[in-house]
Image (cartoon, rainbow, N blue to C red):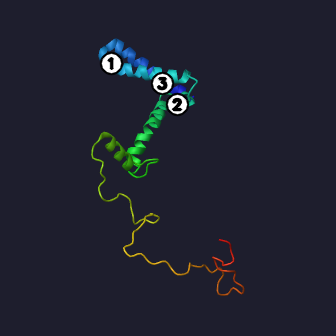
Amino acid sequence: MVGFGAVAVLSLLALGAAAVAWVFGPWWWLLAGPLLAVAGLGVWDLLQRKHSVLRNYPVLGHLRYFLEDLRPELQQYFVERNFDGRPFDRDVRSIVYERAKGTDAEEPFGTERDVYADGYESLVHSMAPVAPPDEPPRIRIGGPDCAKPPTTWPCSTCPR
């Protein structure tokens, strides 16, 4: 009901502006023309049966659909970091674009990622690797107060 009232007020305003333009001169059509177009859009939205958003919120419903179409670009350029995208992040995508164009596709040394953050996974090389132990490590199950601890892992009787 609110949508109908808003379209009715908008239509009356557009018709009033058209009457003023008819009486006082052609410059008023710069105001009356857009108002008549928006009022016509509102009437169309009320009469159509395909989109309930447009029927319940005439004219303003188009803003919702416009922002829905604009969302991927806003997400890509203002929210997402260069290395967050899936399946390919912006860094990888820019290298692919540069290589496709035949321009320089070298990556500078360094990273934008926080390599010191908790949970960051990396492989670190070793200049002097440690020799493997003579015996494989064993896990003792049960504490010092345990009267009959189970066997340690890996068990010599267990199949391998």
Query: 149 or 133, which is in the foreground?
Result: 133
Residue at 27% across / 43% down in the picture? 103
Determine whether the residue tagged by mark 1 lies in a helix, strand or loop.
helix
Residues at discs 1 and 2 in contact (Cβ within 8 Å): no
Residue at 65% across / 84% down in the picture? 143
Quadrant the N terminus occupies:
top right
Residue at 29% across / 41% down in the picture? 102
In this rendering, the label closer to the viewer, 3 or 2: 2
In this rendering, the label closer to the viewer, 1 or 2: 2
User: Which quadrant of the view contains residue 53?
Assistant: top right
Determine whether the residue tagged by mark 3 lies in a helix, strand or loop.
helix
Q: Earlier in the sequence, mark 3 or mark 1?
A: 3
Callout 2 amino acid: Tyr
Q: How many marks?
A: 3
Whole-number angstrom distance, CA of label 3 to CA of label 2: 14 Å
Q: Is residue 15 above or below residue 138?
A: above
Query: 2 or 141, which is in the foreground?
Result: 141
Query: 126 or 61, which is in the foreground?
Result: 126
Whole-number angstrom distance, CA of label 3 to CA of label 1: 19 Å
Callout 1 amino acid: Trp
39 on left or right of 4: left
Question: In the drawing, what numbered circle is on residue 57?
Answer: 2
- Say which residue label 1 marks: 28
The percent position of residue 14, horizontal first and vertical second, equals: 42, 20
- Say which residue label 3 marks: 9
Callout 3 amino acid: Val
109 on left or right of 45: left
Query: 84 or 133, which is in the foreground?
Result: 133
Whole-number angstrom distance, CA of label 1 to CA of label 2: 28 Å
Residue at 32% across / 59% down in the picture? 110
The percent position of residue 99, horizontal first and vertical second, equals: 32, 44
The residue furthest top is 23
